[in-house]
């Protein structure tokens, strides 16, 4: 390795320390946008390339928060099994229903009047030291037990879910490499589980990096905003992400006019700032779609610029930094009329990192 390359790596490392506020007793979390431009179309996503660069410049990296969700488990290569009484939140067409509305991103598992139900989440030996299992406490809540599967002699730890409506967690400490399968069992009554936050720190004095993907293919901001706003603030207060790269609006562009979109986006920003005032909220102007001029997407561009100015936020403008829809097509960067291909996502990841380096 040449001196020039070593010097470049050192500069980038310094940039990440400055950007994400890496004090030795903190963890750096990056939260992504809501739809398939973030979650990935045809298995492709810019965050795949962004993650590796993000995680490489910290003393440790960790799996972070992983939703209890079939699509998420597939994406993260996690083994997932549940009993028949338990339902997937992501299957719900209505995010305003109980208990889906209390989730971070419409993901998780739940059931009413459960009777000794259970589910298993196998991280396939991902590196972590402990995991927090997030659940919903409620006045008519039930109960459950939890443990690692490789400890069959353990009767599990009992936890009641009854109390005021609150976001709660229980914690398991990993003591061996075989502690990879979480077992939530003897679930009785009304219950909802959202996900596990997997930590991987050698001790409390080390900083670490993780990402939190709240996206789902086809998701609209209009639907996301039917989730409970008070609980959204609780989620952001819990994680206090250093950076929120918020890409939203592509799936709203046909039916939601610019006035309604501005209200939705403004309310989401307000919720993040109420829950986590110190988070760097970055508005993302996504790559243009084939119908950019014929849909509300054109007006959304102005909305994002207005909100960035009004709320003093940074705007990551992909078309301005890379090019419009025709540029993406002419340079073979599109998979279809909406989603970039792998090369397109690689370029977006590269430009995003360069943007963060220059602005924050």
Image (cartoon, rainbow, N blue to C red):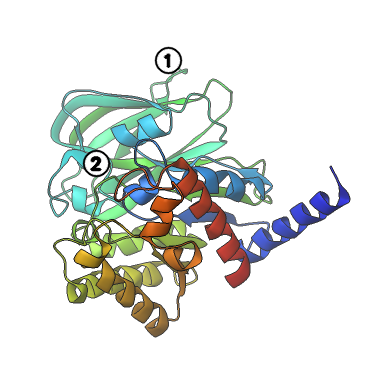
Name the spot of residue 349 as percent of width and height, x first. 52, 52
Confirm whether residue 295 shows in the render.
no
**Residue 353 lies in what quarter of the image?**
bottom right
351 versus 153 height, above or below: below
| Residues packed near mark 2 inside 10 Å, few (<14), some (14 to 19) or many (20 plus) | many
| Residues packed near mark 1 inside 10 Å, few (<14), some (14 to 19) or many (20 plus) | few
2 versus 174 height, above or below: below
Q: Secondary structure at mark 2?
A: strand
Q: Nearer the viewer, residue 134 or 5?
A: 5
Q: Residue at x 44, y 46 (%)?
A: 332
Q: Residue at x 37, y 77 (%)?
A: 305
Name the spot of residue 70 as percent of width and height, x first. 30, 32
For marks 1 and 2, the one nearer the N-term is 1
Q: Is residue 253 left or right of residue 24?
A: left
**Residue 14 lies in what quarter of the image?**
bottom right
Distance from the alpha carbon under mark 1 to that under mark 2 = 24 Å
Q: Nearer the viewer, residue 26 or 158?
A: 26
Q: Residue at x 15, y 31 (%)?
A: 114
Question: Which residue is under mark 1?
Answer: 152
259 versus 318 height, above or below: below
Question: Which residue is under mark 2?
Answer: 192
Query: What is the quadrant of the N terminus in the image?
Result: top right
149 versus 4 height, above or below: above
For discs 1 and 2, the disc positioned in front in the rendered view: 2
Residue at the extreme front: 330
**Residue 319 lies in what quarter of the image?**
bottom left
């Amino acid at each position: 390795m040449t001196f020039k390359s070593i010097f470049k790596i050192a500069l980038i490392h310094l940039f990440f320390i400055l950007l994400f506020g890496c004090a030795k007793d903190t963890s750096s979390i990056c939260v992504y946008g809501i739809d398939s431009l973030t979650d990935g179309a045809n298995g492709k996503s810019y965050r795949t390339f962004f993650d590796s660069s993000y995680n490489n410049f910290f003393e440790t990296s960790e799996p972070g928060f992983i939703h209890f969700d079939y699509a998420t488990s597939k994406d993260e290569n996690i083994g997932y099994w549940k009993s028949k009484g338990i339902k997937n939140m992501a299957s719900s067409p209505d995010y305003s229903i109980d208990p889906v509305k209390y989730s971070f991103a419409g993901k998780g598992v739940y059931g009413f009047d459960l009777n000794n139900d259970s589910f298993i989440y196998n991280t396939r030996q991902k590196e972590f030291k402990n995991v927090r299992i997030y659940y919903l406490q409620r006045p008519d809540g039930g109960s459950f037990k939890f443990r690692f599967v490789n400890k069959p002699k353990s009767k599990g730890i009992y936890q009641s879910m009854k109390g005021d409506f609150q976001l709660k967690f229980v914690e398991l400490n990993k003591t061996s490499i075989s502690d990879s399968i979480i077992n939530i069992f003897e679930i009785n009554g009304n219950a909802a589980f959202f996900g596990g936050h997997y930590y991987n720190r050698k001790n409390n004095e080390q900083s670490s990096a993780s990402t939190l993907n709240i996206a789902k293919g086809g998701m609209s901001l209009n639907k996301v905003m039917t989730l409970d706003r008070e609980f959204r603030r609780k989620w952001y207060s819990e994680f206090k992400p250093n950076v929120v790269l918020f890409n939203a609006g592509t799936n709203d562009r046909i039916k939601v006019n610019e006035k309604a979109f501005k209200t939705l986006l403004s309310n989401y920003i307000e919720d993040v700032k109420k829950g986590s005032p110190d988070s760097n909220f970055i508005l993302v102007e996504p790559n243009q779609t084939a119908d950019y001029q014929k849909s509300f997407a054109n007006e959304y561009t102005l909305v994002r610029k207005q909100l960035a100015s009004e709320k003093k936020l940074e705007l990551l403008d992909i078309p301005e930094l890379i090019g419009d829809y025709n540029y993406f097509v002419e340079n073979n960067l599109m998979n279809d009329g909406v989603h970039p291909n792998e090369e397109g996502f690689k370029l977006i990841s590269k430009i995003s990192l360069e943007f963060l380096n220059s602005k924050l």
